[in-house]
């Protein structure tokens, strides 16, 4: 293909020389410019594509981050629920432990009280053993080797019952026909006598005449009280009774009276043999012969005559 040649211009325009332009050089410039522009467009397209890919990647990453955040939120909520549940369980366990602790303290206090009660029972049992041993010692002086445990216990029981009784001799019997009236009269007579022994005198809960009725005789009267301490006090103050016809005695069992009778005979024999200052003294409610000095003073317990034991 032939190259088109344009006519050249001669002369000068505005002080420059007129000549024909170099068309080939211009074409090269245009071609180079087009290449540059094409390259730039290619770069722009490539950058835009890269931006789009980057945006997609960023969007995907945001989506994944959102999913992860949602998952973390769900996990956090689940953990909070579990923590709350664990807290509730711990609180329930703490309350249960406190309840067990309170119950344990209560049981410990109750156990301590039981221990104290057991100690008291042991002490009372030891005291009872000592008393039984003392009574057995007194019984052995008068009982045979064939005495049985049942006989000993019966004697102990009878002594305990009789320790609340007084035997009163010298109270006239009532002539009333009604038994209740006679008993009322006996109680009144006993009360009047006891008035002379102490400022505070008890009223017997019951009175019993001993033996069969005889219009010519006054039967002994047994007065029964609530406490043996009352009997002890009345016997101690018996010297204050202002009548010689009335006498009061402790209520002894037949075995006690027999033992006391033998003791009195022993005292009499020893006194006749030259021993002096011998007396019968009660120690732990058991009579025995002791030697005293002239200045010693002690009450001598009165005992009803032996014949009352068989009534």
Image (cartoon, grey):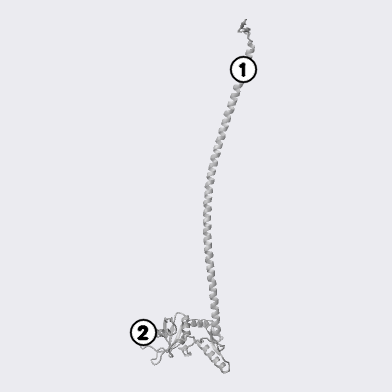
**x then y, percent, for residue 266:** 55, 91
Dot placed on the residue nearer the N-terminal end, 1 or 2: 1
Give the camera-side residue of 271 and 173: 271
- Please state, as top left, top right, bottom left or bottom right, where the C terminus lies in the image: bottom left
Residue pictured at 63% horizontal, 15% vertical: 29
Q: Which residue in the structure is indicated by mark 2?
A: 181
Could you tell me how far apart the alpha carbons at marks 1 and 2 are, in whole angstroms?
160 Å
Residue pictured at 54% horizontal, 77% vertical: 127
**x then y, percent, for residue 212:** 41, 89
Q: Using the image, determine if residue 247 lies above or below residue 1.
A: below
Q: Which residue in the structure is indicated by mark 1?
A: 33
- Please state, as top left, top right, bottom left or bottom right, where the N terminus lies in the image: top right
Q: Using the image, determine if residue 187 lies above or below residue 105.
A: below
* Residue 48 numbered tag: none
Give the camera-side residue of 104 and 78: 104
- Dividing the picture into quadrants, the one containing residue 207 is bottom left
Secondary structure category for the residue under label 1: helix
Give the camera-side residue of 230 and 176: 230
Q: Using the image, determine if residue 145 lies above or below residue 27.
A: below
Give the class, few, some or many, for how many residues have Cα within 10 Å of label 1's Cα (few <14, many ≥20).
Answer: few
**x then y, percent, for residue 10:** 62, 5
Secondary structure category for the residue under label 2: helix
């Amino acid at each position: 293909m032939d190259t088109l040649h344009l006519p050249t211009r001669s002369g000068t325009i505005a002080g420059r020389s007129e000549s024909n332009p170099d068309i080939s050089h211009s074409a090269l410039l245009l071609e180079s410019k087009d290449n540059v522009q094409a390259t730039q467009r290619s770069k722009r397209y490539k950058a835009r594509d890269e931006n789009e890919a980057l945006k997609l990647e960023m969007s995907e990453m945001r989506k994944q981050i959102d999913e992860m955040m949602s998952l973390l939120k769900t996990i956090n909520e689940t953990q909070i629920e579990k923590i709350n549940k664990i807290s509730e369980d711990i609180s329930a366990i703490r309350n249960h432990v406190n309840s067990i602790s309170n119950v344990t303290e209560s049981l410990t206090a109750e156990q301590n009280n039981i221990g104290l009660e057991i100690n008291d029972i042991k002490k009372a049992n030891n005291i009872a053993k000592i008393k039984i041993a003392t009574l057995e010692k007194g019984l052995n002086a008068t009982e045979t080797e064939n005495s049985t445990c049942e006989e000993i216990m019966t004697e102990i029981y009878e002594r305990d019952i009789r320790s609340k009784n007084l035997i009163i001799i010298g109270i006239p019997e009532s002539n009333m026909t009604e038994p209740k009236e006679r008993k009322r009269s006996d109680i009144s007579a006993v009360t009047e006598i006891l008035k002379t022994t102490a400022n505070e005198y008890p009223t017997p809960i019951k009175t019993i005449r001993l033996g069969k009725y005889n219009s010519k005789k006054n039967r002994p009267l047994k007065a029964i009280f609530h406490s043996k301490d009352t009997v002890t006090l009345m016997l101690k103050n018996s010297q204050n009774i202002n009548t010689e016809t009335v006498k009061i005695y402790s209520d002894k069992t037949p075995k006690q009276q027999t033992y006391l009778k033998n003791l009195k005979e022993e005292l009499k024999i020893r006194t006749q043999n030259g021993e002096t200052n011998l007396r019968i003294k009660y120690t732990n409610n058991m009579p025995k012969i002791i030697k005293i000095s002239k200045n010693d003073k002690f009450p001598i317990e009165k005992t009803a005559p032996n014949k009352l034991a068989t009534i």
